[in-house]
Amino acid sequence: MRSAGRSLVRRNPDRKKAAIVTFGCAKNLVDSEVMAGRLLALGYSLIAEIGKADVLVLNTCGFILPAREEADGAIRAALAEKAVRPDLEIVVTGCYVEKDGPELSRRFPGVDAWLGVKDYGRIADAVEGRRFRHGRRTFLYDHRTPRARSTPPGWAYLKVSEGCSHACAFCTIPSIKGPYRSRPAASIVAEAQVLEEQGVKELVLISQDTTFYGRDRGQRDGLALLFLKLLRNTGLPWIRFLYGYPGEISDALLEAMSDPRVCPYFDLPFQHAAASILRRMRRATDAGRALRLLEKIRKRLPEAAVRTSLIVGFPGEGPKEFAELSAFVREARFDHLGVFTYCRENGTPAAAFGETVTEAEKERRRAVLMEIQADVSASKLKAWTGRILEVVRDDPRPEAPGRLVGRTRFQAPEVDGAVFIRPTHRPWKSPLGRVKITSSGTYDLRGVFIP
């Protein structure tokens, strides 16, 4: 759960106070920032303290059951607060609402307004109690849309599209978000220029599949061309993308990413390695293709970092298929890895397969892969000891109180490790700085600031 109020505090004692709580992914966070911008334009004051808010907006995730259960708990807590403060207005938004809106409104009649992913632009109508007609397709903001960022000053997300046109057997996103819709490149560049004027040094391009950018407009190598336009029209020193598909990494994209201002970072969810499982998942890239792609990336960009996500316990994954997956993780030597246990979702093709792996076995398999990855990660990070790296300043971390926190070009925000920096008497004024790496751990680096 993210609270958009962490840096979206705009206090005015004469105005109504709104608090926004965000669940789920970075794309949801951008949606919350857009809603926050509209509330500011309406005259609201944004605060972090739910107990002092006049309006509470819960932006939910509906991707898998645990996310929906988390949202249910937040709605119950909000209604308990409303029982104490009847004037509190509760607005629930997001993917969960889009997926199960009628059922949610039946279960939680005390909620004042419901907004699905088609209705983010109606947040002002919702909080003001005005009736509105629900949208017909997913709301997609542009550079003219008010937006109040909640990330640290040095970096920002920029959403380049909405929706997804893939047909992965396990995924509900296309049914919730609709087909892929790219923003015009001119709008993206214009927003990037605004963010640069605000002091942003790292621009993080996001969508359901950022490598698909432009395909819906009949454009090939759309992401590569977008990189080139951003490089020509901004001075942003770091540009990275998150969320891509392995089969869409083209020579043109690798060439564009060879520019030193583009972070050589690839976020490519392979999901599995066994061919039989990938066919059932409706994914195209098997272990052989994946390893050849990794070799190509690393040959073209020697300092490239690769992150992937994998699913264990998918129906049909027996000991043989899991052994193939384990061998793949050992050989691929990913820089970053996320492993998820399969969660059956009604309405997806995979739901018809039934469950063939117990929850306990799923967790065991996840632990095995993460143990393999821990050794790989520790080995890779140790190689950076003694080097001086450029880092972008990030939010403090509770596990390292009193230490500055930064990220390198090979560490993405909110999903990867960080660089913990020893305090210094000299202030770190710029969002970008140099750090000498003094030691490493399993997933994080430690260093000292170099003025």
Image (tube, rainbow, N blue to C red):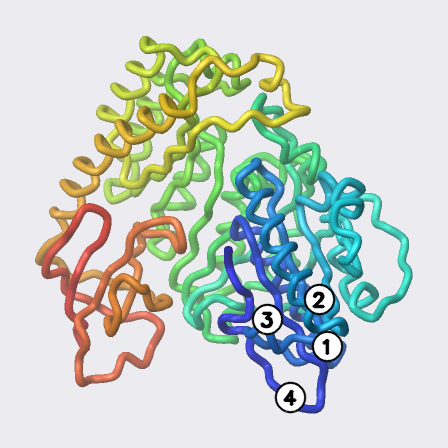
Question: Marks 3 and 2, Cα distance to the nearest angstrom?
Answer: 14 Å
Label 1–label 4 contact, CB within 8 A: no
State which tag comes first along the sequence, 3 or 2: 3
- Amino acid, disc 3: Ile
Q: Position of residue 447 (x, y in %)?
A: 16, 64
The image shows residue 347, relative to residue 82, as above or below, that is: above
For residue 50, which numbered disc appears in the image?
3
Residue sticking out furthest to the front? 84
Which marked residue is nearer to the observer: mark 3 or mark 2?
2
Q: Are marks 3 and 4 in contact (CB under 8 Å)?
A: no
Determine the CA span between mark 1 and mark 4. Answer: 13 Å
Nearer the camera: disc 3 or disc 4: 3
The residue shown at (79%, 58%) is 113
Quick check: 102 left or right of 202?
A: right
Looking at the picture, tell me which residue is in the foreground, 32 or 164. 32
Q: Mark 4 falls on what kind of element? A: loop
- What numbered label is drawn on residue 83? 2
- Left or right of residue 430, residue 80 in this image: right
Q: Is residue 51 left or right of residue 448?
A: right
Q: Which residue is mark 1?
A: 41
Name which of mark 1 and mark 2 comes first in the sequence: 1
